Image (spheres, rainbow, N blue to C red):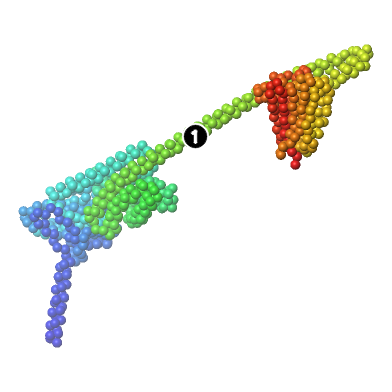
C-alpha cells in the first residue's frame, strides 16, 4: 500500500507540474525591444479579455483578480460586429539602456470608435492615451491618419500596456511598435502610395467628367458617381477625411464609413446596369439590380438614423450577393457580343477582390493585414483604370453606332428627298395634265358652242326664211313650190337633229351615261340596211357601192351603237368621195372578231390628219366634195362606241388614194 501511495503522489506531483507549465504558457511572453529593431509586429503578442458588460474600468482590469481572465490572442484581434469592450494587455521591455527610449505604437484601422491606452510603468505610474473616430483629429496627441501613441520607456523594466477598444463597426485590430525614424520612412512610403492612388482616382474623375459633359451618356454619369464615392470611401478608410477634411467633425468621420458602404454598392449596381444595358438585354437581372439599389438607399437612411450596427451585416450580405451576380452577368453580356463587357468583368473582379478582402476582414473571416488594409484602394484604382478603358471602348462603339445611324439617316433623307422629288414631279405632271385637260375641256366647250352656233345657224336661218315666205306668200304660192319649201324646212330640221344627236352622244359617252344592251347581231344585214338608206345620196353624186359581204357574221354589240358606227363611216365615205367614184363595203370575220370595212376613193388622209383622226372636233385638211356639213364628231363617236362594245377601229390611208376604215367587234358566242 505504501508503494501504491507513493506512486499516486508522484503522479499527482507530475500532473500539478504540467498544469503549472500550461498556466505559464497561457501568459504571452514579454515583448523585448532589442537593438537594431525598427518595427515590431504585435501579432500574437497580446492577451485579450472580452468585457461583455462594457462596465469594467482600468482599476478593475489591473486588479490581480482579473489577471487570469486574459487569454493569449492568436494573430490579430478580429471580432466582427460586437457590443462588448475588448481589453488587450501587452508587456514591453527594453533590453539595453543605450537603446531608443521612445517608441510609437501604431493601430489600424481608423474606423474604431473609442480607443484608450493605459501605460503602467514599473514604478506603478499610469499614463492615459485616447484615440478613435469619435475623438476629433485636432485633439489627438499625434495627428496621423491612424491612431498613433508615443510610448516613453526610460528604463529597462517591464512596462504594462492595457488597450481598451469599443466600436459599433466591425471590430478588428492590427498593431505595430515603431522606432520613430523608421516610422517616418514608413509613413513617407505610405504617403507616396496614397498620393498615387488619389492621383489615379482624381485623374479618372476629371477624365470621365469631361466625357460626361461631352457625350451626355447616363452610364458615364453613374461611373462618375461611382468614382467619387469610391474616392471618398478610400479617403475615409485611410483616415484622410478626418485628418484633412473634417478634423473637428467627429460625428461625420464616425458616420461616413457606414454611409459610404451602401453608396458604393448602389453606384456600382447603377453603373453596371446602365453600362451593360441590362434593362434591354436582361430585364429580370435588371430588376434585381434595382432591388439592390433600393436596399442600399434604405440602409444609408438607417445609418443616418443611428442603426448602423443593425444594417451593417445586411450590407455585407448585399455586397456578396451583388458579387455573385455581377461577374456572370458581365461574362454573359460579353459572350453575347458586347466586348466592353469583358473589360467590365476584369475591372469588377479586381474591385470585388479588394472589397471582398475588406468584407471578410469585417466579418472576422480574415486576419487584418496589408492586403485587407489596402485591398479596397488597390482594387478601386485598378477598377477605375480598366473602366476608363471600357468607357473608351464604349465611346468608340457609340461613335461607330452614331456614324452608322448618321449614314442610315442620310440614306433615309436622300431616299426621302428622292421620293419627295419624284412625288413633286409626279404631282407637277398630274397638275400639268389636269391643266391640259381643263384647257382641252375649255377648248372643247368653246368648240362645242362654236360648232353648235355655226352648224345650227344655217338650218335655223333656212327654216326661218322659208317659213316666213310660206306665211307671207301662202295665198299666191303654187302648191309645188309650197311643197318644195316644206321639204327644205324638213331637211333643215333633220340636219339640226343630227347635229344635236351627235353632241348628245359624245356627252353621254364621255360622262358614262350611255347604257348599251349587248346582244347577238348580224352585222351583214345591218350594213345592208344602212346602205339602203343612202340610195338617193349615192345617186346624187353618181357613186357606185360594191359589196363583199359574208352571210351571217354574228357579233355581240349594242344594236343602236352598231347602226350609228356604220352610218357615220358610210356618211363620211359619201361626203368625201368625188363624183362618179366607188365605195366598197365588206364584211368578214377572224377567229375572235367580226370585221366590216368601208373604203372610198376620196382625197385620203395625211400622216398629221391620221394622228388626230379620232379626236373630237378635229378639222382635217380634206373637205367634203359637195360642200356637205361636217361637225368633226363622227369618227370620235365611232371610236368610243366601238371600244364600248369591246371592239376597235383603225384607218389605213394614202394621200390621193382614199381611206379604208375597219371596225372589229367581238363575235357572238
Snapshot quadrant of residue 318: bottom left
| Label 1 crowd (10 A; few <14 / some 14-19 / many >=20) | few
Question: Residue 426: x and y, percent?
Answer: 57, 30
The residue under the point 21% across, 46% down is: 193
Task: Give the structural element (helix, strand or loop) at label 1.
Answer: helix
Residue 558 shown left or right of residue 104 in the figure: right
The residue under the point 63% across, 27% down is: 434
Viewer-side residue, 449 vs 328: 449
The residue under the point 23% across, 44% down is: 196
Seen in the picture, residue 341 relative to 453 is either above or below; the reply is: below
Looking at the rendered image, the quarter that the N terminus falls into is: bottom left
Question: Residue 305: x and y, percent?
Answer: 35, 51
Viewer-side residue, 207 vs 401: 401
The residue under the point 24% across, 58% down is: 367
Looking at the rendered image, the quarter that the C terminus falls into is: top right
Question: Residue 107: x and y, percent?
Answer: 20, 53
Residue 17 shown left or right of residue 305 in the figure: left
Seen in the picture, residue 358 relative to 498 is either above or below; the reply is: below
Viewer-side residue, 260 vs 334: 334
Which residue, given by chain and number where applicable, does mark 1 sit on?
Answer: 415
Question: Residue 256: x and y, percent?
Answer: 30, 48
Seen in the picture, residue 660 relative to 591 is either above or below; the reply is: above
Amino acid at each position: 500500500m505504501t508503494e501504491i501511495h507513493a506512486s499516486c503522489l508522484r503522479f499527482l506531483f507530475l500532473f500539478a507540474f504540467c498544469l503549472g507549465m500550461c498556466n505559464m504558457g497561457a501568459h504571452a511572453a514579454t515583448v523585448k525591444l532589442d537593438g537594431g529593431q525598427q518595427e515590431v509586429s504585435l501579432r500574437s503578442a497580446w492577451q485579450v479579455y472580452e468585457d461583455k458588460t462594457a462596465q469594467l474600468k482600468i482599476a478593475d482590469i489591473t486588479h490581480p483578480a482579473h489577471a487570469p481572465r486574459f487569454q493569449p490572442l492568436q494573430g490579430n484581434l478580429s471580432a466582427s460586429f460586437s457590443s462588448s469592450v475588448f481589453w488587450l494587455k501587452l508587456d514591453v521591455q527594453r533590453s539595453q539602456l543605450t537603446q531608443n527610449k521612445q517608441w510609437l505604437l501604431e493601430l489600424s484601422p481608423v474606423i474604431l470608435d473609442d480607443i484608450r491606452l493605459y501605460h503602467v510603468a514599473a514604478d506603478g505610474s499610469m499614463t492615459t492615451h485616447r484615440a478613435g473616430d469619435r475623438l476629433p483629429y485636432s485633439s489627438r496627441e499625434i495627428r496621423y491618419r491612424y491612431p498613433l501613441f508615443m510610448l516613453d520607456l526610460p528604463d529597462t523594466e517591464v512596462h504594462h500596456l492595457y488597450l481598451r477598444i469599443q466600436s459599433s463597426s466591425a471590430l478588428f485590430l492590427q498593431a505595430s511598435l515603431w522606432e520613430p525614424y523608421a516610422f517616418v520612412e514608413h509613413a513617407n512610403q505610405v504617403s507616396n502610395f496614397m498620393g498615387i492612388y488619389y492621383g489615379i482616382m482624381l485623374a479618372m474623375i476629371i477624365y470621365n467628367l469631361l466625357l460626361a459633359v461631352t457625350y451626355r451618356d447616363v452610364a458615364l454619369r453613374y461611373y462618375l458617381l461611382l468614382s467619387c464615392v469610391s474616392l471618398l470611401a478610400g479617403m475615409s478608410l485611410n483616415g484622410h477625411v478626418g485628418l484633412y477634411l473634417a478634423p473637428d467633425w467627429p460625428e461625420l468621420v464616425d458616420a461616413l464609413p457606414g454611409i459610404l458602404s451602401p453608396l458604393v454598392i448602389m453606384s456600382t449596381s447603377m453603373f453596371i446596369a446602365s453600362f451593360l444595358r441590362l434593362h434591354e438585354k436582361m430585364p429580370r437581372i435588371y430588376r434585381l439590380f434595382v432591388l439592390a439599389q433600393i436596399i442600399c438607399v434604405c440602409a444609408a437612411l438607417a445609418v443616418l438614423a443611428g442603426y448602423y450596427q443593425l444594417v451593417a451585416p445586411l450590407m455585407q450580405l448585399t455586397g456578396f450577393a451583388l458579387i455573385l451576380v455581377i461577374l456572370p452577368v458581365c461574362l454573359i453580356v460579353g459572350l453575347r457580343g458586347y466586348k466592353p463587357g469583358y473589360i467590365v468583368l476584369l475591372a469588377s473582379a479586381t474591385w470585388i477582390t479588394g472589397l471582398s478582402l475588406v468584407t471578410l476582414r469585417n466579418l472576422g473571416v480574415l486576419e487584418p493585414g496589408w492586403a485587407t488594409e489596402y485591398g479596397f484602394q488597390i482594387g478601386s484604382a485598378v477598377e477605375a483604370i480598366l473602366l476608363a478603358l471600357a468607357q473608351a471602348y464604349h465611346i468608340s462603339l457609340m461613335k461607330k453606332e452614331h456614324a452608322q445611324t448618321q449614314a442610315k439617316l442620310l440614306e433615309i433623307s436622300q431616299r426621302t428627298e428622292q421620293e419627295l422629288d419624284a412625288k413633286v414631279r409626279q404631282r407637277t405632271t398630274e397638275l400639268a395634265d389636269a391643266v391640259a385637260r381643263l384647257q382641252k375641256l375649255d377648248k372643247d366647250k368653246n368648240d362645242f358652242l362654236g360648232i353648235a352656233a355655226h352648224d345650227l345657224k344655217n338650218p335655223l336661218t333656212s327654216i326661218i326664211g322659208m317659213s316666213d315666205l310660206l306665211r307671207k306668200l301662202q295665198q299666191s304660192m303654187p302648191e309645188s313650190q309650197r311643197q318644195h319649201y316644206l321639204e327644205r324646212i324638213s331637211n333643215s330640221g333633220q340636219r339640226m337633229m343630227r347635229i344635236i344627236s351627235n353632241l348628245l352622244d359624245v356627252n353621254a359617252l364621255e360622262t358614262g351615261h350611255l347604257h348599251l344592251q349587248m346582244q347577238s347581231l348580224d352585222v351583214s344585214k345591218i350594213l345592208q340596211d344602212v346602205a339602203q338608206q343612202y340610195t338617193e345620196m349615192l345617186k346624187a353624186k353618181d357613186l357606185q357601192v360594191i359589196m363583199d359581204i359574208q352571210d351571217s357574221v354574228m357579233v355581240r354589240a349594242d344594236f343602236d351603237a352598231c347602226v350609228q358606227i356604220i352610218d357615220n363611216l358610210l356618211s363620211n365615205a359619201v361626203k368625201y368621195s368625188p363624183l362618179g367614184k366607188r365605195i366598197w363595203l365588206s364584211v368578214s370575220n377572224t377567229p375572235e372578231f367580226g370585221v366590216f370595212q368601208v373604203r372610198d376613193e376620196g382625197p385620203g388622209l395625211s400622216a398629221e390628219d391620221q394622228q388626230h383622226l379620232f379626236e373630237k372636233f378635229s378639222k382635217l385638211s380634206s373637205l367634203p366634195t359637195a360642200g356637205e356639213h361636217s361637225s368633226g364628231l363622227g369618227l370620235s363617236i365611232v371610236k368610243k362606241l366601238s371600244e364600248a362594245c369591246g371592239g376597235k377601229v383603225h384607218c389605213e390611208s394614202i394621200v390621193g388614194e382614199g381611206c379604208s376604215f375597219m371596225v372589229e367587234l367581238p363575235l357572238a358566242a
